[in-house]
Image (cartoon, rainbow, N blue to C red):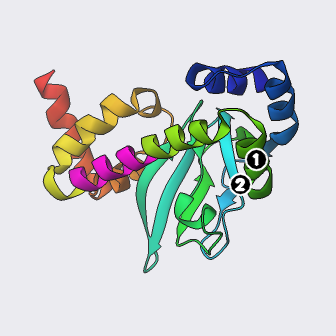
């Protein structure tokens, strides 16, 4: 499992054998059952995870209604940076939609990664920049795109998730009720 993470890191920065050994010590395997929380509302996000298998959902509880704003799948990093970086309580929730296996690194161990791995801080910057761009794209899409376009973007961004997660999570992500998503899907099917 660690080899998948090491390859992902090595694709972004140069790492030597000593770096590989340190990374292997800093990241720990953690399993989550379907429904388990990676992060609960009000808790401080203390880990960054790398998903080996499974799907995680990012959402906010808005007066008892779940508002999904993202998903994490295999080979994605999972974290709430808004909580993790300043070590402050989270408004967001991250929950396993399937049984998941992750490699996690604590806040303190990530500081070791940054200081001991030659290009560790560069790797962190690359990951944060990707998250930042995805967040801005999602925000812009929410305000400017119709639900139909957001659904089409979901299919392009997460094609493998369409059959893996319940439709009501997809509807929440798109910003519609499940019945409206059914109509959008049937219109898309007729056009194809």
Q: Determine whether 35 is above or below 5 in the image.
A: below
Q: Position of residue 67 (x, y in %)?
A: 40, 63
Q: Position of residue 110 (x, y in %)?
A: 73, 49
Q: Determine whether 65 is above or below 54 in the image.
A: below
Residue under label 2, please give it: 47
Assess disc 1: are there few (<14), some (14-19) or many (≥20) residues with their C-alpha within 10 Å of its C-alpha: many
Residue under label 1, please give it: 105
Residue at the spot 26% in from the left edge and 48% down from the top edge: 181
Task: State the residue lying farthest toward the bottom.
Answer: 63
Q: Residue 175 magenta-drawn?
A: no
Element class at badge 2 = strand
Q: Determine whether 191 is above or below 60 in the image.
A: above
Answer with the quarter of the image where residue 31 lies: top right
Element class at badge 1 = strand
Q: Are marks 1 and 2 in contact (CB under 8 Å)?
A: yes
On screen, residue 113 versus residue 85, left or right, reads right
On screen, residue 36 versus residue 18, left or right, reads left
Assess disc 2: are there few (<14), some (14-19) or many (≥20) residues with their C-alpha within 10 Å of its C-alpha: many
Front residue of this view, candidates 18 and 48: 18
Residue at the spot 29% in from the left edge and 59% down from the top edge: 177
Tag 2 or tag 1, which sits nearer the N-term?
Answer: 2
Front residue of this view, candidates 87 and 50: 87
Residue at the spot 62% in from the left edge and 62% down from the top edge: 84
Q: Position of residue 57 (x, y in %)?
A: 53, 51
Answer with the quarter of the image where residue 47 lies: bottom right
Q: Determine whether 183 is above or below 15 in the image.
A: below
Residue at the spot 59% in from the left edge and 36% down from the top edge: 123
The C terminus sits in image quarter: top left
Magenta part, dominant SS: helix
Segment tinted magenta in the rendering: 131-141
């Amino acid at each position: 499992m660690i080899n998948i993470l090491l390859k992902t890191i090595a694709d972004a920065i140069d790492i030597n054998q000593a770096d590989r050994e340190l990374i292997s010590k800093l990241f720990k395997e953690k399993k989550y059952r379907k429904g388990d929380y990676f992060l609960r509302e009000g808790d401080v996000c203390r880990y960054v995870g790398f998903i080996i298998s499974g799907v995680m959902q990012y959402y906010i509880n808005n007066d008892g209604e779940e508002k999904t704003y993202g998903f994490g799948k295999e080979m994605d990093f999972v974290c709430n940076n808004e909580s993790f970086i300043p070590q402050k309580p989270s408004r967001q929730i991250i929950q396993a939609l399937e049984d998941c296996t992750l490699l996690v690194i604590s806040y303190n161990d990530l500081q070791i990664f940054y200081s001991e791995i030659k290009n560790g801080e560069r790797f962190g910057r690359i990951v944060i920049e990707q998250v930042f761009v995805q967040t801005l794209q999602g925000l812009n899409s929410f305000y400017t795109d119709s639900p139909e376009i957001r659904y089409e973007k979901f299919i392009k961004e997460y094609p493998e998730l369409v059959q893996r997660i319940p439709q009501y999570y997809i509807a929440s992500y798109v910003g519609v009720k499940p019945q409206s998503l059914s109509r959008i899907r049937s219109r898309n099917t007729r056009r194809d």
